[in-house]
Each structure stands twice: as C-alpha cells, then as structure tokens.
Amino acid sequence: MKKIMLIFGTRPEAIKMCPLVLELKTRKNMKTRLLVTGQHREMLWQVLDAFSLVPDYNLDIMQDKQSLFDVGIRILTKIKPILEAEKPDLILVHGDTSTSFYAGLAAFYCGIPVGHVEAGLRTYNPYSPYPEEFNRQAIGSFAEFHFAPTDEAKSNLLQEKKNPDRIFVTGNTVIDALKTTVKKEYHHPLLEGDMPRILVTMHRRENIGKPMENAFRAVLKLMDRIDQLQIIYPIHKNPVVREIAQRIFKNHPRIHLIEPLDVLNFHNFMARVDLILTDSGGIQEEAPSLGKPVLVLRDTTERPEGIAAGTLKLVGTDEKNVYEESLHLLTDKDAYETMSKAVNPYGDGFACKRIADLLEKYF
Ligand code: UD1
Ligand code: UDP
C-alpha cells in the first residue's frame, strides 16, 4: 500500500485539490493523507467544508498581514517532523503558492518524490505574477511528476528539458470541481432582477496599491455611466485589499462589497453575471467553460488558452483602459457575444481520474 500526502494551504489550491483527494480516496491500493498548511484560514475552510473534507494535519500558520518570510519559515519548521514521521511515498502539491513551493522543497529535502499538479504554466516574468512565477518554476525543477493541464503547459516543460516520460497532460482539476458546483436552478437575493451585473475580484500582490486603486476608480466611473449597473465584489480576506476597496467604493448603493463566497455560491454567481473583472488565476480557467467574458486586470497571463479561446482579454490596470474595455463589452452586443462562447481549453472534468490512474500505474 503506497502512501500519498496531498498538501495545500490556500483557497485556489483547495478548490483544485479537493476533487483529487476525493478521487484518490476511492482507490483501494493507495492510502491518502491530507496536510493543510493553513496559509489561509477562513477562505481555506470554506472550501474544505464544501467538499466535506477534514485534514489529517493542519499547520495553522496564518498570521494577520503575513509576509512571504513568515509563511516560508513557519511551513518549513512545522512540516519537517510530520514528513519524517509519516514518510509518504509521494507528496502532491499544486500550482504556484508559497505553500506549494515550501512544502515541495521540504519533501525534496527529505528525499520524498514530489508530484506537481497544474505544472508548466509560465509567463517567464519573475515579477508577474510575483512570486508565483518563481514558485512554479522552482517546483518544476525538483518535481518528479508534472501533471500539466494543457498541451501548451506540457510544451513549456519540454522546452525546459524536463523528462518527457514524467509529463502528463491531464486537463485542469478545476473543471472537475465546476462539474459538481454549478446548478441549473440557483437563486440568490443579489442576483434578483434583470440589471446588468459585474462580478469583481482582485487580490494579486503586484496589484496592491496604485494598480488596484486605478482599477477600482474605473469601476466607479462605470457606475456613473451605466444606470442600474450592479457590482458584486466578494472581497479577499487580505486586510490591505479590504482597506483599499472600502476606501474607494465607500458605501455606494449599487456596489455590493461582501465576504468571500464559498465555492458553490461563487461558481453559480460566475455563471449568472454579465461580466467578470478579475486578476485571479483560477477564475481565468473557470470562465471559458462557463462562456463568461473576463477582463483580466493584469499585464501578463500564464493562461493563454483562455485568451486564444476568446473568453479572456488582458486589460491591465490603467483606469481609462479598464473603463473603456468594460463599457465596450456592456454596450456593444456583438463584442459581448463574441466573448461569451463556452469553450473548454482546460479539460473535460476527468483530470483527477487521470492523475489517480497515472499514480496507480506508477506504483
Ligand atoms: C496567496 C498566493 C496567491 C493566491 C492567493 C489566493 C502565494 C505567494 N500567493 O496570495 O498565489 O492567488 O493566495 O487567494 O502563496 N487572509 C485572511 N484569511 C484568509 C486568507 C487570507 O485573513 O482566509 C489574510 C491574511 O492576513 C494574509 C493575507 O490575507 O496576511 C494575504 O494572504 P496570503 O496567503 O499571504 O496571500 P498572497 O500571498 O497575497
Ligand atoms: N472563489 C471563491 N469565492 C470567492 C472568490 C473566488 O470560491 O469569493 C474561487 C474562484 O472560483 C476560483 C478561486 O476561488 O476557483 C480563485 O481563488 P483566488 O482568486 O483567491 O486565487 P488565484 O486563482 O488567483 O490563485
């Protein structure tokens, strides 16, 4: 019986790894262990609860306004004795967070093979997204197995001379999650009535400060321009982001600043609003399969498939640009329709099964 330890700590990793935990738990010849670092707290538990999962270990490292140093030091210190005691045959980490990098590094130091889920995404700009681009490249350098979501991600890994026998295109596990969350029948008071609606999220480290303020001002300007426009903005728990959002949006009656939605509600909101403005990575993968136009509040993306598919457009954070691009989409029916075609560049919703099959075969 082989032991696999899945490790994650933030909301986006949890959304993409919980379906994999559940899939691996159905396999008789593998024992799973779930370790969460607790890099996030409320936002992590929202996801664990939605998937009814209870971790075997919680490092509970989160601190208010934590720095990259705080997160790294606390993970490395707390994870070592657990890895030494549990001795998993393999650990699985996801994507590009501090949790994934430091947990992967700790396993590497302990001589435990690392499988990287959502491997091969690249901008090749270490400052965008920062520090995630570094994290994912670093994990790629010590990972034994690379589970790439798309052919494009695979070709990045091949170019970097990773072992081709250890790169597998599986699709993105976020599509597996979406299959279970989006409902035909769904109601919420904020979605009542036939008004135009924009769903906003913004939290990236490199956007905090001026870029975020500019994007928010563009939204304010839109409110003056379009009668009845409603903004739904579930604000990230990051206190710095909250302060900026509250300062700029104040108590605008049509801007709904709400707590982070749990994933079931959020996916159903995504499926029902008119437009999404975000700097999130995961949302860029979910939106194409829901046929929802997304204006990406960043200058780079490691998700070129959604751009190629036509659902995503990079608009950066310049106030004028964000305003004009949003206005264009909300007022030009043809432009809107062109961006609202549902396509599926990120897989068919069977990524977890593929990863589990591959691991079974390997063991
Ligand atoms: C991290 C990831 C980023 C991911 C984002 C998802 C890294 C380097 N970055 O961002 O890739 O997109 O998470 O949201 O790992 N907080 C709470 N409660 C929570 C969660 C966060 O209070 O449930 C607060 C904490 O005070 C924390 C702050 O939010 O200081 C930021 O969280 P952190 O995980 O440090 O965020 P990022 O590194 O910006
Ligand atoms: N999400 C959520 N509730 C919210 C906002 C986002 O469940 O209020 C989900 C969203 O569907 C996506 C993930 O969280 O799956 C994205 O997380 P985040 O934007 O925090 O991180 P990123 O994807 O940028 O790393």
Image: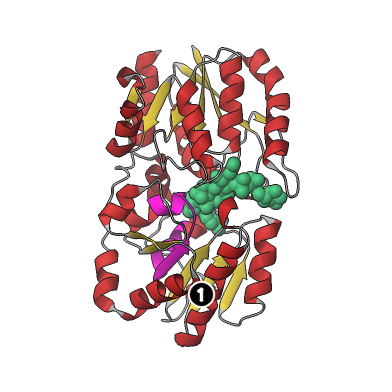
Decide which of 30, 163 is in the foreground and name it: 163
Residue 180 position within the rendered picture, expressed as x and y whole percent measured from the top left: 41, 48
Above or below for 325 versus 33? below
Kindly identify the residue that appears in the image at 63 percent across and 16 percent down: 86
**Position of residue 182 in the picture relative to residue 235 (left or right):** left
Question: Could you say whether the residue bearing mark 1 is in a helix, strand or loop?
Answer: helix
Q: Please report the bounds of the magenta region as a residue range.
A: 267-285
Above or below for 180 versus 311? above
Magenta span has 280?
yes
Q: Is the CB of mark 1 within 8 Å of ligand 2?
A: no
Residue 67 position within the rendered picture, expressed as x and y whole percent measured from the top left: 70, 43
Residue 294 position within the rendered picture, expressed as x and y whole percent measured from the top left: 39, 62
**Displayed quadrant of residue 307:** bottom left
Kindly identify the residue that appears in the image at 39 percent across and 20 percent down: 359
**Position of residue 28 in the picture relative to residue 311 (left or right):** right
Kindly tell me whether residue 27 is visible in this rendering.
yes
Name the residue type under label 1. Answer: Ala
Kindly identify the residue that appears in the image at 41 percent across and 12 percent down: 363
Residue of label 1: 218
Kindly identify the residue that appears in the image at 75 percent across and 49 percent down: 64
